[in-house]
Image (cartoon, rainbow, N blue to C red):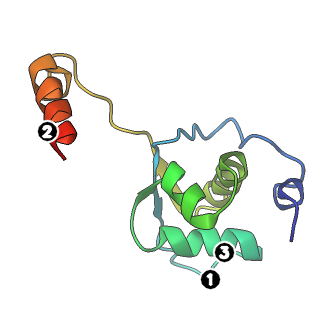
Amino acid sequence: MVRPYTVTRGRTRPSARHAIDLMSQVSAVEADDAPARVDHARACLLDLVRHGPRPVAELAADADLPLTVVRVMLGDLAEAGLVRIDEPRRAVRGGPEADPELLREIVERLREL
């Protein structure tokens, strides 16, 4: 077992250049040249991302690692140009996501299950 602070080299946050939200979408970037050298933990995370764009929270759950560790590792992979991190889409004011009637109906249907 490797301690999380060892994997992140003692860091608790990714670099300031990357805003990594829980619901940020992470996708792999196709490398034109030889792949950058990454350690085992980052390579495993990169393999999870290569299956398709996924939110950070889902990657942390599938990797069975703490969210803070995954955020630091994703920041490292983004710095290396191996992943792209997109901000989550926000609901538009007045859009269908903000309709109280729609939300009530969804809650009622879920209760029926």
> Does residue 38 appear in this view?
no
**For the residue labelled by badge 3, is the local secondary structure a helix, a strand or a loop?**
helix
Question: Does the rendering let one see residue 45?
Answer: yes
User: Relative to residue 79, is residue 47 drawn left or right?
Assistant: left
Amino acid type at image mark 2: Arg
> As rendered, which of 106 and 37 lies closer to the eye?
106
Which badge, 2 or 3, is on the more N-terminal residue?
3
Residue 12 to residue 48: above or below: above
- Extreme residue toward the front, this view: 112
Residue 25 location in percent, x, y? 43, 50
Residue 14 on image: x %, y %: 71, 43
Return the residue nearer the eye: 1 or 20. Answer: 1
Query: Of marks 1 and 2, which one's residue comes earlier in the chain?
Result: 1
Say which amino acid is labelled 3.
Answer: Ala
Which residue in the protein does label 2 denote? 109
In the image, what residue type sits under mark 1? Ala
Q: CA distance from mark 1 to mark 2?
A: 51 Å
Q: Would you say 87 lies left or right of 70 here?
A: left
- Residue under label 1, please give it: 34
Whichever of labels 3 and 1 marks the residue nearer the N terminus, that label is: 1
Instruction: Identify which residue is drawn at 39% across, 39% down.
Output: 88
Mark 3 to mark 1 CA distance (whole Å): 14 Å
Q: Residues within 10 Å of mark 2 (few under 14, many from 20)?
A: few
Quarter of the image that includes the N terminus: bottom right
The residue that appears at 71% across and 50% down in the rendered structure is 72
Q: Residue at x 9, y 20 (%)?
A: 101
Q: Which mark is residue 43?
A: 3
Mark 1 crowdedness (10 Å alpha carbons): few <14, some 14-19, many ≥20: few
Placement of 91 over or under 3, stated as above or below: above
Q: Secondary structure at mark 1?
A: loop
Q: Residue at x 40, y 61 (%)?
A: 53
